Structures are given as C-alpha cells and as structure tokens.
Amino acid sequence: MHSTRGSETKLTSAARETDYLVVGRVLRKVGKPVHIICFWLQPDKLAKFFVASDICCFFLQASGGSLMAIQEEDMQNLGKAVVLASLAIQLAFFSAFTYVVTLIQRNDEYNCSHKQAPALTPVFVCLWITIVLLYMRNIFRTIEFANDRGSFVVTHEWLFYAFESLPIFLAVLALTSFHFGRLMECQGVDQPRWMAQIDAANATDAANAADAGKTVIGYDAPHCEDKAVVAPALKEDV
C-alpha cells in the first residue's frame, strides 16, 4: 500500500514545476538574485535549481520503492528509510521555494508587491493556493510513510482521498482557473501589464540610485522574450 499511495504523480510534479517556472520568469524580469541560506541564486538559475531538486527526489523515491519491493525485511526497511529521506528533502526544498516566493512578494526591493505590480496579484494568489495544497499533500505523504502498515493513517482510505487526492485536484483546478499563460502572456511588441509595472518600478529604483550615486545590485535592463522596449529615461540612468 505504501508503494502505491506514496508514488509521485505526474499532476503533482506538473503543479510544482509550473510554480517554479512562473517564479523563475518573474525573477528574470526583475533581474535581481535571491539569497537562500548561504548562497545567491541568480534569476536564470532559480527554476532550474528547484526542478533539478525535484528530479533528484524523484529518483531517490524510485530507488526506495525498488528496495521496498524486495522480499527481505532489511531491504524493505532500508527502502522505507530512503523514501522518507527523499520526502523530507523534497519538503525542505519546497520550504526554500516558499521562502523565495515570500521574499519576492513582500520585499519592496523586488518590485513585485501589490502596490508596485498589482497585475501580479492574481499570479501570487494562484501560487499561494497551490503552495498550501502541495504542502498539505507532502506532509501527509511523509506522515503516511513514517507509519507502519497497520496504522490508522494507512488503513483508513478516506485520509488518502482527503489529504492526497483532494489537494492535487484543487491545485490543478486553481492552475486551470487562473491560468498563468493568460495572466503572463507576452505577445507582439507590447508587454503584459505586470512587466510594464516592474519596468516602471525598476526605472524608479535606477533613477533614485543614480541620484544617490549608488548602483542597484543585480539590476538588469528590463527585458522580455517578445522584444520589450526599454524606456528612454531608464536608458539614460543605466
């Protein structure tokens, strides 16, 4: 039962990686790195870093599941320990990602707050909905694997549907309802509103820094995959 319930689903991975890519795209637009524990994570590396962590955890879980399939108690215990470790590591990386989202949204330095870039508000609403739901699911999976086969958590099916199936369903529903592709689309030569708002905030930061004789650390000229135009005033400051 553990190996069936605990297996990583494609929908869960897709929801998590969608969040990683969206935050990575926002950070690339901002052009400033984030500090995680003891190192700086560059904007173009954020999504790759968290997706890579997901892939590593997936292989650890697959290895643990393979060991649990062996008909030897020692190997099964080892497999369970490997899966538990991978779930704990995955939860730690997801906590780091949650910290990054909080930092980008709350720290005015990144110009992504509701006041500075109101067009990003629905994006962050969807991010937080999916983050909370995926947290619920990850915590339940960790608790489930930590318990024995005859425990209450494992033997009562409704817990599986309430804390694993339902959060995944609601997360996918949120992603399809808000639809990042529609909120963040970048067509032709016109920028979406959220990009224009970040450009304006970045230009203000650059102008203020120039007046004060300082350099905005990590700042890059506003850019967009669809040929964004840099404001003339910003060109002079940069």
Image (cartoon, rainbow, N blue to C red):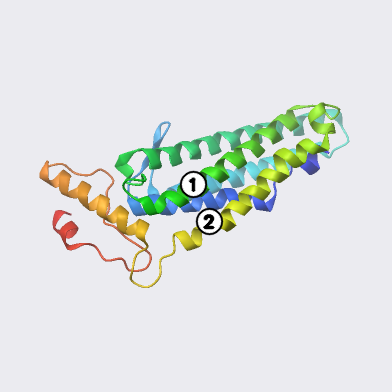
Numbered disc total: 2
* Residue 150 drawn at (x, y percent): 86, 27
**The residue positioned farthest toward the bottom in the image shown:** 188
Task: Identify the residue under disc 2.
Answer: 178
Q: Residue at x 74, y 44 (%)?
A: 7
* Residue 109 drawn at (x, y percent): 30, 41
Kind of residue at badge 1? Val
Give the quarter of the figure containing the N terminus: top right
Left/right placement of residue 219 relative to residue 73 reads left
Q: Label 2's element? A: helix
Left/right placement of residue 111 relative to residue 151 reads left
Q: Residue at x 57, y 39 (%)?
A: 132
Kind of residue at badge 2? Phe
**The residue positioned farthest toward the right in the image shown:** 71
Q: Label 1's element? A: helix
Q: Residues within 10 Å of mark 2 (few under 14, many from 20)?
A: some
Q: CA distance from mark 1 to mark 2?
A: 9 Å
Label drawn at residue 125: 1
Q: Nearer the viewer, residue 191 or 64?
A: 191
Snapshot quadrant of residue 199: bottom left
Left/right placement of residue 237 relative to residue 142 reads left
* Residue 126 drawn at (x, y percent): 52, 49
* Residue 74 drawn at (x, y percent): 82, 28
Left/right placement of residue 82 relative to residue 90 reads right
Give the quarter of the figure containing the C terminus: bottom left
Residue 201 in sight: yes
Q: Residues within 10 Å of mark 1 (few under 14, many from 20)?
A: few
Label drawn at residue 153: none
Residue 14 in sight: no
Q: Nearer the viewer, residue 193 or 35?
A: 193
Of the two numbered discs 1 and 2 on the same chain, state the one appearing first in sequence.
1
Tag 1 near tag 2, CB within 8 Å: yes
